[in-house]
Amino acid sequence: MVRRILVATTNLGKRREILSILREYEVEVLFPEEDLKVEEGSCSFLENAYLKAKAYYEVYKIPTLAEDSGLVVPSLDGYPGVYSSRFYNLEWGGKEEPKEGKDKANINKLLRLMEGKQDRRAYYVAFAVLFLEDGGLWSEGRCYGTILQEPVGEGGFGYDPIFQPEGFQKSMAQLSMEEKNLISHRGKALRRIMQMLK
């Protein structure tokens, strides 16, 4: 049985969220001391997660969990997609100056491109990979919703202030951590991984 898992991320928002999700399982959660700067650039969330998990496993030699996630907007041809974290800097749709940080620049660009669009459907998707010495496991989680007209709420990170999950009258950024973990793409993917591990 796996007793310790390294979670391959240095993103503080993701760390807090993952730690709160994995708290219900009897496993010690560790985080890397340094960011390995794994070259992603893949067209696939799953491949990116695999590359991260493998790279960190090779350094730390303990079971390693990595995930890659993003926001998919059908009316924008699936963008931001795998480029979610650096969407502001993509030539596609025009670059956005990160004056108030990358998250705000990503949100500003997305809202600009959504102007006048009737179809505001979107979903968050996460792929999680657990890299083990004798193989590995992977899972997928999704959270469906719509893009709001403007940011609402101070919680969460990334696109949470402009994403309204199905069944809620508030943005992802207005949900408590407990509410978010129950419905989030990351929560679903990580719980499936842990259930498979059992």
Image (cartoon, grey):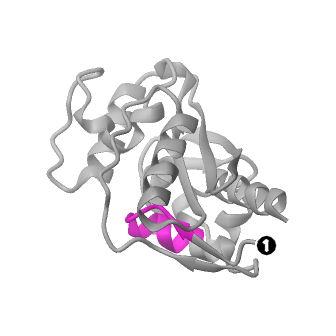
Figure quadrant of residue 144: top right
Quadrant for the C terminus, please.
Answer: bottom right
* Residue nearest the observer in this picture, 94 or 1: 1
Is label 1 in a helix, a strand or a loop? loop
Confirm whether the magenta stretch covers residue 13. Answer: yes
> Among all residues in the image, which is located at the extreme front?
134
**Residue 164: % across, % down:** 60, 49
Magenta-drawn segment: 6-18
* Residue nearest the observer in this picture, 185 or 138: 138
* Residue sitting at x 26%, y 45%: 105
Quadrant for the N terminus, please.
Answer: bottom right
Mark 1 crowdedness (10 Å alpha carbons): few <14, some 14-19, many ≥20: few
The type of residue carrying mark 1 is Met
* Residue nearest the observer in this picture, 182 or 14: 14
**Residue 58: % across, % down:** 45, 57
* Residue sitting at x 69%, y 59%: 190
Is residue 34 depicted above or below 82 in this figure? Answer: below
Give the side of residue 58 with respect to residue 41, left or right: right
Is residue 20 depicted above or below 136 in this figure? Answer: below
Q: Is residue 148 visible?
A: no
Confirm whether the magenta stretch covers residue 65. Answer: no
* Residue sitting at x 38%, y 38%: 40
* Residue sitting at x 36%, y 32%: 41
Kindly identify which residue carries mark 1: 1
Give the side of residue 143 with respect to residue 91, left or right: right
Q: Is residue 136 visible?
A: yes
**Residue 15: % across, % down:** 48, 70
